[in-house]
Image (spheres, grey):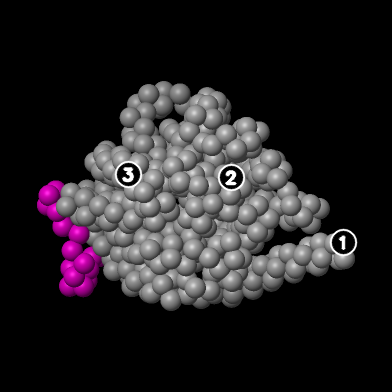
Amino acid sequence: MAWFSQARGNNQRVCFLLDMSSITMSWVSFRNRMEGKLISPLARNTLWALGGYGLRLLIQAAYFVIIARCLGPEQYGGFIAATALANVISPFVGLGSGNLLVKNVARDRRLFPEYWGNGLMMTVVSGSVLTFFVMALCRLLLPRAIPSLAITLVCISDLIFVRILDLAAWAFLGFERLSVNAKLNVLISLTRLIGIAGLALAFPHPTVRAWSVVYLAGSVAAALIAVIWVMWSLGRPKLALHRIPREGTEGFYFSTSLSAMTIYNDIDKTMVARLATLGAAGIYAAAYRLIDVVFTPVRALLSATYPGFFRSGAAGLQGSLQYGRRMLVRTLPYSLFAFGAVWISAPLVPHILGHDYADITAALRWLAILPVLKTLHLFIGDSLTGAGHQRERTFLQVGVAIFNVLLNLWVIPAYGWRGAAWSSIASDGLLALSLSFLVTRMGRGFNLEIARVADVPAASCEF
């Protein structure tokens, strides 16, 4: 009977994975039919980005359900806590090489070999150094219950191989080839799904160490494929070391900005694991992951428009703000709809993840407002970045990250995951208000009136 129960559970997992594959193939068929009918390059790129993020999240959802059910809230919380801490440091890998690549290639494609070569070198060197630093930090900050081997494998994966794949994705984004960028976004999740599915079928209750081995193997395979893809399609790397000191300050601002963003998005998961319980960390991390799912369409548009912000901002802040204003007016209604949809559907989630995740309903309802706040501050922030004001954006983001950590130190010990949710809402709201105030002080108010949007030249933000 025990063997029959195990086999039945394994068959259910296989059926779930086959359902995900069917959904994936349906999306590809729909995209192929639609691609020929879309005229606007931005709309086509947005569709590709949405497809890439969407398929990636569908695949992640498949192995997220498997991992969450197999590990349980405590072990899952420990695994997520280690990955969250690595993600806080990972933006400093490469020192903004990906952003610099997109900025310069979007304006002059002949510069690609030099920025691709510099980026690879900076990623490998800085990633190796930061891996040892984060491993020591994890041992200092995280509970001893999390195995050292799991932390080591997660750090190597996220700080070296995932960052190499990210750089490859940046390369195709610089050429606005969102079709390949989308495929690379799917690639790493697909390689991990294959490993995780095999592990789940072979062992009914795998350990965190086993998950970590599969996690690293998927990252290595995806990074190798991505590098070969870039060299085959775009060209070989070429070192131009004289550019590194000259652009080092701007690259540092990009890295600091991404790290601050990761802090106020992810550090609370690590802090919940440390200051509350691993079970609470699992509940909160699962709820936040689902919020990321509903934010996918906005993230897709942000990816598709990122090179456009640099081109529009070459003439100054007014150009990039006009570009961002039009995109925001088109996107904000979706974020408001997502808020209502999450609030209404939250009670259904425990039936999918299991009774151990009963508290996730309340967590989702608290976090439902985040897509609205993120939409506001990300479009305003990208407008500043495109016009060369990354330093000002970075200072505000660092301030919000510090505010988030200090607030978490107060509210998480007292209120657990609820305190982390309140801190996230306060941080994203504060950043949206701060950026709006900044562009107003700079004399370029981010007005959302339709009359102002109508004045934007159609050629500059075609959709």
Labels 3 and 2: the sequence-earlier one: 2
| Camera-side residue of 294 and 84 | 84
Asked if residue 195 lies left or right of residue 332, the reply is right
The circle drawn on residue 202 is none
The circle drawn on residue 410 is 3
Instruction: Report the residue at 51% width, 57% height from top.
Output: 283
Label 2: which secondary element: helix
Asked if residue 452 lies left or right of residue 369, the reply is left
Asked if residue 456 lies left or right of residue 100, the reply is left
Q: Find residue 134 and report its horizontal and vertical position in percent.
A: 51, 30
For mark 2, what is the residue?
79
For mark 1, what is the residue?
3
Labels 2 and 1: the sequence-earlier one: 1
Residue stretch rendered in magenta on the structure: 439-461
Label 3 close to label 2 by CB (< 8 Å): no
Label 3: which secondary element: helix
Instruction: Report the residue at 27% width, 51% height from top.
Output: 431
The reply to whether the magenta stretch includes residue 354 is no
User: Dot 3 surroundings within 10 Å: few (below 14), some, or many (20 or more)?
Assistant: some
Labels 1 and 3: the sequence-earlier one: 1
Q: Find residue 289 and report its horizontal and vertical position in percent.
A: 50, 58
| Camera-side residue of 100 and 52 | 52
